[in-house]
Amino acid sequence: MALIVQKFGGTSVGDPERIKHVARRIAAVKAAGHQVVVVVSAMGHTTDELIELMGKVTDYASPREVDMLLSTGEQVSIALVTMALQAQGVPALSMTGAQAGMRTEPVHSRARIVDIHTDRLKQVLADDYIPVVAGFQGVTYSGEICTLGRGGSDTTAVAIAAALRADECEIYTDVSGVYTTDPRVVTDARLLTEISYDEMLELASLGAQVLHPRSVEYAKQYRLNLRVRSTFNEGAGTLVKGVQDLENQTPVRGVAADLNQAKVALMDVPDQPGVAARLFSALSEHGVNVDMITQAVRGEQKNDIGFTVAKSELDQAVQVTEEVGRQVGASGVVQDPDVAKVSIVGSGMVNHAGIAARMFQALADGNINIQMIATSEIKVSAIISRNQAQQALRLIHNAFHLAGAAPAVEAISSEVKF
Amino acid sequence: MALIVQKFGGTSVGDPERIKHVARRIAAVKAAGHQVVVVVSAMGHTTDELIELMGKVTDYASPREVDMLLSTGEQVSIALVTMALQAQGVPALSMTGAQAGMRTEPVHSRARIVDIHTDRLKQVLADDYIPVVAGFQGVTYSGEICTLGRGGSDTTAVAIAAALRADECEIYTDVSGVYTTDPRVVTDARLLTEISYDEMLELASLGAQVLHPRSVEYAKQYRLNLRVRSTFNEGAGTLVKGVQDLENQTPVRGVAADLNQAKVALMDVPDQPGVAARLFSALSEHGVNVDMITQAVRGEQKNDIGFTVAKSELDQAVQVTEEVGRQVGASGVVQDPDVAKVSIVGSGMVNHAGIAARMFQALADGNINIQMIATSEIKVSAIISRNQAQQALRLIHNAFHLAGAAPAVEAISSEVKF
């Protein structure tokens, strides 16, 4: 008998039929003799509808009231999923974040979980009921409702799994798992059976929108087996686990593209200490999140400092950079709003020479110019023109022989956005 | 400076525009220097929509899960009303039943309030915020969400007003107040400026659906001034208060008709002790709620026992009565599914002879046959044919000179159902 936490996202519980389908899946696992804790998100478009309603009442809503409003979405889901389980004769009990003991810090819209009081959850399990817990929400010690922000339901599931020392945490979604690359772009992308936490973190932050990075970090911290699988087929999906537990180490696990990038460069910066610190402090103070940073050393005691930001922050970044540039005597600022970041990720690459070179060669073969490069122990990223990103994904995917036997794209729901 | 509890029903907060309108009304009272506590119901058709959704998931839902589901409706309202107040620069704070300290007995779908922990409410008021409290809901001491059943938001408002010793509890609705009779039937029905608790209780239970009887009982118990007024006009509405505080005592305050009545009679019951007890025990055991009871004494040691029930319970009532009839040797059971109860109510009638006679004469003048009669200290009721009920209302209303100067029907929203 295993203890399994199952999390179902908004698409999985998007309408009454899907809720009944989810209940049948849960019931089957219970019938196989396992203990199950269920975590659910708000139904499909509920959150968007509530936000629309809010927009008709006020132009600015306080975060506390937004949390009060949005947390109803998950409460509706837990009641309906529990009813669907009961209708199949499976004892189940819905639990709000508060009832499930999720204690958060007193921060609205992006609270962190500080503690889980598992007494009630354990009692419900001991009584042979399936607890159906509202994701995305918790309460402070003074009873304020706080939401966990983006990816919050994944975080709820992983935190509960860690607190209960569950054998596995399953994240059900509308894709079959994690792929070697985006299967909507590269049709022979292969479904991965396993991936390490760190690889998943790099891929998650690179735009493979399957799991929120916070939930992966949590899983890594507690050495929790995390499985991504589809609500709509019976495949085993992808198991995210510790690098030391992987059955096979490959230099490159996957290839990702992030299209939401823009490039800024401060040109001809005098080669003196503290300029970079000054620039990135100023950007941080103005709320600009910087992704990649490169500094090209040139002759004549001059450097170019380049970095990338999300497209939406480009104007702000340019403004701050121009101001700093004037102060330090740089020659000017150049910007490019149309770049993309392509990356290879693999925990085995640190032991393999030539991995980065093979990636650059693949790009060169496609006549794709590399504008910036950044590397970490398990990742190599390159900034290229955005209109070459899809071609780059295919070339790199081929260069590392990542293709699967059959086209993967049939396993992808139409609801995924690219 | 007065402390006023204002309760707004589902129609009053039915859409974003109405929510903003309600916020403006609340803000005006606050601006006039008063302290305000707001209680709101779920928006318009939210509850019906949630019930419809539930029906698509299961045929039978456990009361606990129904409460979990439906209590989200009020939570949405409190967030939106609070946002609308904040948008007008009025400090406000939404509070779920749990946060407002509403403790209920552990009974789902029709819980009674056992206690209100007012510490938080008082603190919010002291901080000069307007608490916006979810009606209809509370929590048990172990944190289970329970709803209060029909009319629950009125009960919430009255209970909070009593606990805070508020100067007045205002129930905002889509009618202008309490009328001498149904203004959709009798066009010159007059809006009452005041009415006693007991009169209101009789009228409420007689089908004047303005206030739920439980909230009136609560108000009576705590000697709380309860005002019924319209969200959509500025009228002062009707003040419900103690009979000793009424400015004028009239023999007849109002006239009501209850169309949801059916008549059953057990004929030729042998005149021996215990038969009535046996009949009504059996009805009670089978869940039949009996309204009026009459026993006509005839010659020959035989009685007829008549009673009325809600139309929906007629078949069950007849079945039980036939069974008891066989056991006690009655000659048979007659039924009439098409009756109505018309009643006059007034706390002054006990001191006025001839009030009942005047009502019966009015019915006789209209050639309306009276099938059953029941009286209490402040009420006289008669069972008549349902198709004569509207005529009866008009005749009795005239007989007691209850008409107002101007037609009242313009004050009535189209949303009220007859």
Image: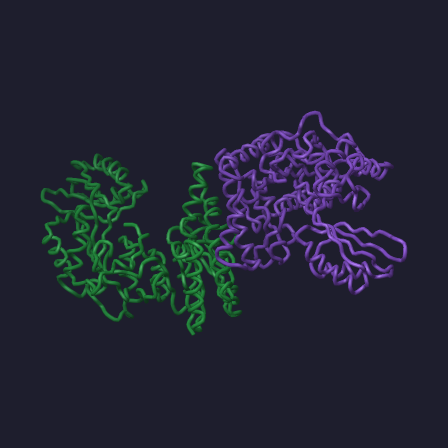
Chain colours: A purple, B green
Residue A35 drawn above or below residue B256:
above
When asked about the image quadrant of residue B219, the answer is bottom left
The number of callouts visible is 0
Q: Position of residue A169 (x, y in %)?
A: 66, 39
Q: Position of residue A121 (x, y in %)?
A: 59, 45
Q: Residue at x 43, y 64 (%)?
A: B24
Question: A365 left or right of B313?
Answer: right
Q: Nearer the viewer, residue A96 or A325?
A: A325
When asked about the image quadrant of residue B333, the answer is top left
Asked if one can make out residue B220 in the rendered structure from this viewpoint, the answer is no
Q: Residue at x 13, y 42 (%)?
A: B302
Asked if one can make out residue A259 in the rendered structure from this viewpoint, the answer is yes
Residue B122 drawn above or below residue A33:
below
Q: Position of residue A2 (x, y in %)?
A: 65, 35
Residue A188 drawn above or below residue B356:
above
Q: Nearer the viewer, residue B198 or B2?
A: B2
Q: Position of residue A155 (x, y in %)?
A: 65, 46
Q: Residue at x 26, y 53 (%)?
A: B206
Question: B107 left or right of A258?
Answer: left
* Residue most extreme to the top: A405
Q: Residue at x 54, y 35 (%)?
A: A23
Q: Nearer the viewer, residue B204 or A299?
A: A299
Question: B42 left or right of A207?
Answer: left
In the rendered image, the quadrant that contains the N terminus of chain B is: bottom left
